[in-house]
Image (cartoon, grey):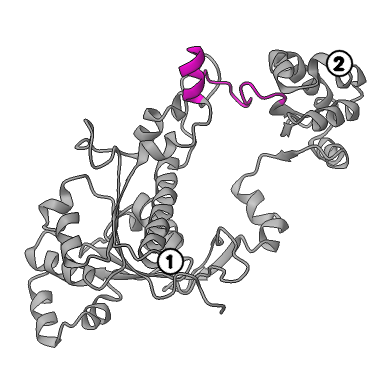
Amino acid sequence: MPRQILEGIRVLELGQLIAGPFAAKTLADFGAEVIKIEPPGQGDPLRKWRMLHEGTSVWWEAQSRSKKSVCVDLRQPEGQELVRRLAAQADVLIENFRPGSMEKWGLSWETLHTLNPRLIMLRVSGYGQTGLKRDEPGFAAIAEAMAGLRYLTGEPGRPPVRAGLSLGDTIAGLHGALGVLLALYERDARGGEGQMIDTALYESVFNLSESLLPEYSVFGAVRQPAGGALPGIAPSNAYQCADGEYVLISGNNDSIFVRLMRRMGRDDLAEDPGLAHNDGRARRAAELDEAIGAWTRTLGSAEVLAALREAEVPAGRIYTARDIAEDPHYRARGMIETVTTAKGLKVEMPGIVPKLSGSPGAIRHRAPQLGEHTEPVLREAGLDDAELAKLREKGVIA
């Protein structure tokens, strides 16, 4: 296996469910050693989320690949001391508890920074470590709504809908992983110390909101739900075909728009000077959508896609999980990996993103069973047989 860029970086993951663990998974994919701290008993609740195989979520297998599991009860003083001992030897600590929890356990940023000045601490929460809402519980759905995303999803005149995935969590996890990499660069390439990274779910989603706020700031415009269309950028929508299937067509580039119209046999629209640029097309988006829809409704979806592929117009089907699993392009790009679980089940899951040419990421081993690495990790931290036995007896570790 080629050298991985984060080899030698030790990450202590105290988070649970999605946001913090997704950040840690991203670092693990590129070689970081991730030690996941889980409560004795049931462990991370994600182990029981969505569809289970023999009692364990298959989502867990994807999110916790290449990690180690250490069971420590953070509610007990001895468990908190164990985390401090591990943090003293770590490069990164990730947590996504409600603000104030780490302080309650004696694991504040100030305490950990004094203990290990090189430590980088990623803190992911709904609303951030400061501000008026810091103490409120924050989940992805609420963060997406506060960031303006939920208002935009759905059809005009109907209640907004959820995207169907916990986007607020994973987007925050990606921002958090980016923050960790920036802090590692500052520490290791520029001779700095460790630092604390404060990542809020709502801010991470808001960061992707494009022109939403600038348009309100300048024009007082409140963007409204637009269904499958992309407001202000035309044509770009989902169009029904003769077989009842929908295809997505993005003809909003000037030259692409001309190719699309000519392929549809609408030279009149291709040559219309009022449609030469996006601002003119945006004003006539409904007219263009009707013209494109009239054309797609005369052809099957495969015929539409073949015609647009020949004309070099971006278009595609709307994929289900089955479509993804059966698409050869995913496999040609290494975007579907197969991992065998501890119980022998083969699970397909998303591959590594992004793709580095010289030091690519890799899945090094399956997701851990609960507490699988408790003893070896704590022995490496300096605990002996007597200490481990005492901690097990008190229920601090498992």
Nearest-to-viewer mark from 2 and 1: 2
Instruction: Kindly indicate the quadrant of the structure image that contains residue 246.
Output: top right
Q: Answer few, some or many: residues within 10 Å of disc 2's Cα (few below 14, many 20 plus, some between 14 and 19).
A: few
Say whether residue 56 is left or right of residue 344.
left
Instruction: Kindly indicate the quadrant of the structure image that contains residue 320.
Output: top right
Seen from this angle, which residue lies furthest bottom? Answer: 385
Name the residue that disc number 1 marks. Answer: 28
Q: What element carries label 2?
A: loop
Q: Residue at x 89, y 21 (%)?
A: 266
Nearer-the-camera pick, 16 or 186? 186
Q: Which residue is drawn at 48% across and 65% down?
A: 29
> Looking at the picture, which amino acid does disc 2 mark?
Asp
Q: Where is residue 330 in the image (x, y as percent from the top left)?
A: 66, 57
Q: Main secondary structure of the magenta part?
A: loop
Name the residue that disc number 2 marks. Answer: 272
Q: Position of residue 185 (x, y in %)?
A: 41, 62
Q: How far apart are marks 2 and 1 (CA)?
A: 53 Å
Answer whether residue 228 is magenta in the image: yes
Answer whether residue 65 is magenta in the image: no
Q: Quadrant of the C terminus?
A: bottom left
Segment tinted magenta in the rendering: 212-235
Nearer-the-camera pick, 290 or 13? 13
Q: Residue at x 14, y 59 (%)?
A: 111
> Looking at the picture, which amino acid does disc 1 mark?
Ala
Q: Position of residue 101 (x, y in %)?
A: 16, 49
Instruction: Kindly indicate the quadrant of the structure image that contains residue 325.
Output: bottom right
Say whether residue 176 is left or right of residue 30.
left
| Mark positioned earlier in the residue sequence (2 or 1) | 1
Say whether residue 214 is left or right of residue 231.
left
Residue 53 appears in view: no
